[in-house]
Image (tube, helix red, strand yellow):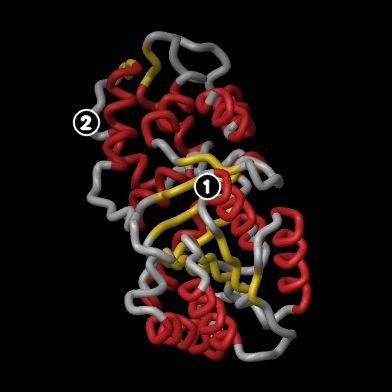
Amino acid sequence: MFSKLLKRVLGKTTDAIKDVAPKKRKNIPKDEFEDILLEADVHYDLVERLLEPLSDEVNRVQAFNSLISVFQYKADFKNSDVKPFVEMIIGVNGAGKTTTISKLAYRYKSEGKKVLLGAGDTFRAAAIEQLSRWAVKLDIPIVSTKQGHDPSAVVYDAITSGVAKGFDNIIIDTAGRLHNQPNLSEELKKMIRTANKALENAPNRKMLILDGTQGSSSINQAKAFDEMIGIDGIIITKLDGTAKGGSVLSIADELKMPIFYIGTGEQPKDLIIFKANEYVNTILDEIFV
């Protein structure tokens, strides 16, 4: 089930691979493997490193061992039994932040958990409305306010309410911002400080949403956010809409952060746990017999 779903998500990427290597074989020339990786939007420097130990003719085992090595770093997934478990969702406008929150909420609720949303993006009225619509659709309570109000107040109210009412998970939205917007950056830092005042060690996880259609260019964005507030993990969206699926390798190599999930569509159920082995095999299935 997972493999079929991931194959669909990476469909445009595997189509691009077929343009370079239309016929599956047991072995392919090293320079052809290089072309495939570059076509899939893997960083050039990383491609060179991945190819260095390989022989002139590459087989599937060699290719798998090379690609999977990118994910061999120590990643703290920061899963916790603490209740409520508070997550703050961060990213730029258009990355799919609000939709991803609905997917996380749906996932937790499906696991039998009691979920509360916090509409901390008070910068845009549309963001509050969109998240509120998802809350109604999923029958999940939400703490919200009006556009322009202090988002830190929403953070405080959501967490204190969640504690008082025994919620398992609190998911807090934040304003879509670029890392080079000083005012919004300071606001985000304040929201994090407020969360910790409302509940010690909150937020328990700061999750960054990266738009898969941006490919490797999203890496600088992620680095800047990590330097600013410390990112605990990544969710990659919209991979089904791009041929840049190889950028996941570049993201993992550069950031060395846990990739928690991949978005697979627009509906709340369209979120899958990222598994490096399955990801690598899905790409190699299009190259080797």
Q: Residues within 10 Å of mark 2 (few under 14, many from 20)?
A: few
Quadrant where the C terminus lies?
top left
Q: Secondary structure at mark 2?
A: loop
Disc 1 target residue: 112
Question: Vertically, is 148 above or below 88?
Answer: below
Kindly identify the residue that appears in the image at 33 percent across and 75 percent down.
201
Residue at image mark 2 = 53
The residue shown at (34%, 33%) is 67
Q: Within 10 Å of the Cα at label 1, are there few (<14), some (14-19), or many (20+) other Cα atoms?
A: few
Position in image of residue 132 (x %, y %):
73, 67
Residue 146 makes an appearance in the image: yes
6 vs 102: above or below: above
Instruction: Check disc 2 and give the amino acid type.
Output: Pro
Which amino acid is tagged 1? Answer: Gly
- Judge from the rendering whether residue 232 lies leftward or rightward of residue 145; answer left or right: left
177 or 41: which is nearer to us? 177
Where's residue 90, x and y in %?
A: 52, 68
The residue depicted at 46 percent of the width and 62 percent of the height is: 207
Residue 212 at least partly seen: no
Badge 1 element: loop
| Of labels 2 and 1, the one closer to you | 1
Mark 2 or mark 1: name the one nearer the start of the chain.
Answer: 2
